Image (cartoon, rainbow, N blue to C red):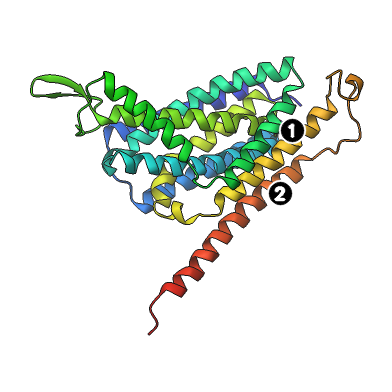
Amino acid sequence: MEIPVAFQVGSLIVLVLILAADLLLVLKRPHIPSTKESGLWVVFYVTLALLFAVALWVIGDTNHALEFVSGWLTEYSLSIDNLFVFVLIMSQFAVPRKYQQEVLMVGIIIALILRAAFIMVGAVLIEQLSWIFYIFGAFLVYTALKQVFEKEEHGGDAKAESFIVRTLRRFVPIHDQYDGSKIRTVVNGKKMLTPMLIVFISIGVTDLIFAIDSIPAIFGITQVPFLVFAANLFALMGLRQLYFLLGDLLEKLRYLKFGVAFILAFIGVKLVFHAMHVNELPFVNGGQPIEWAPEISNWVSLGVIVASIVVSTVASIAVNSVETKRSAPEN
């Protein structure tokens, strides 16, 4: 069953307006949100996503609702992983906590633009080249293995950002001090850029890297461009508040990367199975579909995604709790 065009256009307009209102709120009243404020916003956006899933179930069908929820949870878990790099960038450039909300909103907007572009390209490739699923699947499995076995979680990203920062400083005068959230400032009568520009560029590079990882993952769950974009949009909405809500807890979610890696590997295998079902490569099975390849249902996909997130989170909390008790001084 097709999703009505009116519903697609209307829901996207409403969601973009909500995101724009959130941005204006940050620009007009920069502040450090309290835990309660951040928690309420996160609950609001999660509830909004679940209501959207219910609307899809009523207007479309169960499959569309399941695809959206699975895609949203996958992108949400990947977005939380993205927060680790945001924390690193904020610390590296000593961004005043009062202005970190603006930095995060800029990062979210950049991520939306990049992902929209990747989604359009991905949709065209999938429509024209069915064998692209083999490449997407292999890439996700490679990404999962890399995430599990790499020694430093984000060492490559940091090196890329450092190279860009060094190159930028070589050609552009950049002051060492922040001037609020401004990108440009005046020092001794001379116009200079502030470190905020470097922060925005670093965030943009990070978003680009994560967009390359996340788009093949979501296409492994649904090939409906509207659902792909909606899942990404809902995953990014509330990410700013989640950053302040989790705070130092992010570093304690030590096993989350393994849960995310398992999700990526699972979706990668699912993509390869799907590629086998729609196979057109002449050197594979004579260019004919491979019927014996197993089909993974939407319910199974949702169960694996939820279980991976829950197990990795609970394991992190449990291990941290044991270590805290062991390190506590005995009475």
Name the residue: 32% across, 29% down: 198
Q: Identify the residue at horizontal 79%, vertical 31% (top origin).
A: 274
Q: Is residue 168 toward the left or the right of residue 205 in the image?
A: left
Tell me the residue at 84%/19% (across/down): 280
Q: Foreground residue, 149 or 90?
A: 149
Q: Which residue is under mark 1?
A: 271
Mark 2, secondary structure of its residue:
helix
Please indicate, yes or no, whether residue 56 appears anywhere in the rendered image.
yes
Disc 1 element: helix
- The vertical placement of 159 against 115, above or below, is below
* Picture quadrant where residue 124 is located: top right
Q: Nearer the viewer, mark 1 or mark 2?
A: 1
Q: Amino acid at mark 1?
A: Leu
Q: Residues within 10 Å of mark 2 (few under 14, many from 20)?
A: few
Q: Position of residue 272 (x, y in %)?
A: 77, 32
Which corner quadrant of the image does residue 223 belong to?
A: top right
Task: Say which of 129 and 41 sits in front.
Answer: 129
Judging by the rendered image, the residue that carries numbered circle 2 is 303
